[in-house]
Image (cartoon, grey):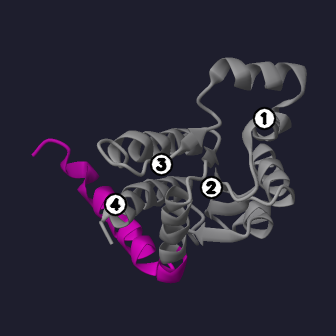
Amino acid sequence: MRGAEFLASIDTYLEQLRRQIAALDRAQLAGFAALLRTACDEGRQIFIMGNGGSAATASHFACDFNKGLSYRREKRYKFICLNDNLPMLTAYANDVGYDAVFVEQLKNFLCAGDLVIGISGSGNSANVVRAVEFANAQGAVTVALTGYDGGRLRRAAQHCVHVDVHDMQLVEDIHMVLDHMSMRVVGQEG
């Protein structure tokens, strides 16, 4: 069989992923789902952001909830991905600084009671931490999706879904699982 030399590594990776999923704190998962449902029920905006792979996850969340979960429904999600507007992102990065790219966008749109989700595998993305701290000061509800030890973001956010593993690929995989699982769970008519 072609690729047989990769089978052991594939099995190892999948087993590590399975163990990390099994170790997730179910109360954190349920709490996150409840925050998403509440935001929708109350007509709140949901801001989400990240860098690198976490930016892709943030964008995927926005697509899944704005289209996948809202299409043909009366109550619709209002996800805004702060890393999706490249001209705005680069303008703030160039003129103000990369640490300000998310907080400056929040200054335009954030209202008290809105939900702000920061994704950072390490938990130490300065621009995400700064945006969550700003959101807290404005009366928003904040959630961190983290890995490793959770870093500064875990301590800054009011709520956290933490993946306790020091492996960026496993953390990012589980953050994507969280997107699809949350979409499925909150999409059920209750």
Instruction: Name the residue carrying label 1.
Output: 108
Among the two numbered marks 1 and 3 on one chain, the one whose residue lies closer to the N terminus: 3
The type of residue carrying mark 1 is Asn
Kind of element beneath mark 3: loop
Specify the farthest residue to the right: 96
Specify the farthest residue to the left: 1
Left/right placement of residue 10 relative to residue 40 reads left
Instruction: Name the residue carrying label 2.
Output: 121
x then y, percent, for residue 28 = 55, 76
x then y, percent, for residue 134 = 84, 52
Among the two numbered marks 1 and 2 on one chain, the one whose residue lies closer to the N terminus: 1
- CA gap between label 3 and label 4 equals 11 Å
Instruction: Name the residue carrying label 3.
Output: 77
Q: Residue at x 37, y 46 (%)?
A: 70
Instruction: Name the residue carrying label 4.
Output: 187
Pointer 3 and pointer 4: residues touching (CB < 8 Å)?
Answer: no
Between marks 4 and 2 in the image, the one whose residue lies nearer the viewer: 4
Crowdedness near tag 4: few (<14), some (14–19) or many (≥20) residues, C-alpha within 10 Å: some
Q: Residue at x 50, y 71 (%)?
A: 34
Write down the region rendered in magenta: 1-28
